[in-house]
Image (cartoon, rainbow, N blue to C red):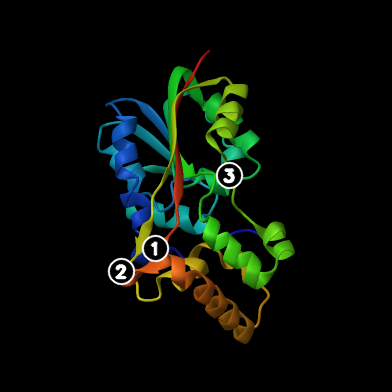
Amino acid sequence: MAQSWDVSRYEARHDYVWKYGAALVELLSPQPGERILDVGCGSGQLTEEIARSGAKVVGIDSAPAMIAQARINYPHLRFQLAPAAEFRDWEPFDAVFSNAALHWMKPPGPVAETIARALKPGGRFVAEMGGHGNIAKVLDALRSVLGEDLVAERNPWYYPSIGEYASLLEAHGLSVEDAMLFPRPTRLDTSHGLRDWLEMFAGVFLEGLTQHEREGALAGIETKLGPSLHYDGAWHMDYRRLRVVARKTA
């Protein structure tokens, strides 16, 4: 099942996705005139941030709704509807950037191949994604409420360890210069933060349920996670992020 996106909800209630990415743009350090590819650009906020440096940036995403909104938000930039594994361009890039997107792209091998193919020799890859252990408590609650088999069958995410992802990149000619896996508990500011997050990002697990079943499942997940993820008056996601800097060797 493919993930569907409610872009208006994404922009209104989940802006932390790209706000946390601002530090990653600083790490990328885009330079005037560089060609940069933004993989999984969403509705374009960080693509625009990169472009402000004077770089020539291309944003790609596999979600039609995201690309449509990105073109509305930033009509002066180039956005292309394309799964990362299938993207090709006639001119190589100085850098490839990706924030909070690669963990949606399965299998990861063809995506790594695209990244390597897109880069010039010596070009850099700067990315952050969900890493090993990301939303572990949420996944446990999903399994408990909806069943192990359903969650395994529908799980859209890929959360690798440092070693796993570094090996994948190295197999495609990318030398890893820096990698870190770190916790980032993230506050959800809406009053129904967890439920809103589940409906936004984990709706694939709820498909096919009646409205009554859906409400029961959401309430059950909230009950299981309340003791560990609801504190200081709000819900907090148990995020763990994997940040990688690599370079094309040849």
* Residue 80 visible within the image: no
Position of 191 with respect to 172 (left or right) is left
Residue at the image position 63 percent from the left and 58 percent from the top: 2
What type is the residue that disc 2 sits on?
Answer: Asp
Residue linked to disc 3: 83
First in sequence: mark 3 vs mark 1: 3
Residue position for label 1: 236
| Nearest the eye: 162 or 250 | 162
- Pick whichever, 216 or 6, lies toward us: 216
Crowd rating for badge 2 (residues with CA inside 10 Å; few <14, some 14–19, many 20+):
few
Circles 3, 2 touching at the beta carbon (< 8 Å): no
Which residue corresponds to mark 2? 232
**In the rendered structure, which amino acid carries the disc numbered 3?**
Pro
Q: Tag 3: Cα neighbours inside 10 Å, few (<14), some, or many (≥20)?
A: some
For the residues marked 3 and 1, what is the alpha-carbon distance in whole angstroms?
A: 30 Å
> Residue at position x 52%, y 43% from top?
102
Q: Which residue: 68% across, 75% down?
A: 208
- Count of numbered marks: 3
Q: Position of residue 221 (x, y in %)?
A: 55, 73
Residue that appears at 53% across and 54% down: 63
Q: Nearer the viewer, residue 232 or 34?
A: 232
Quadrant of the rendered image containing residue 140: bottom right
Residue 121 at x, y = what percent? 48, 15
Q: Residues within 10 Å of mark 1 (few under 14, many from 20)?
A: many
Q: Secondary structure at mark 3?
A: loop
Q: Are marks 2 and 1 in contact (CB under 8 Å)?
A: yes
Q: CA distance from mark 2 to mark 1?
A: 9 Å
Element on which disc 2 rests? loop
Please, is residue 14 above or below residue 213 in the view?
Answer: above
Q: Is residue 7 above or below residue 167?
A: below
Name which residue type carries label 1.
His
Element marked by disc 1:
strand
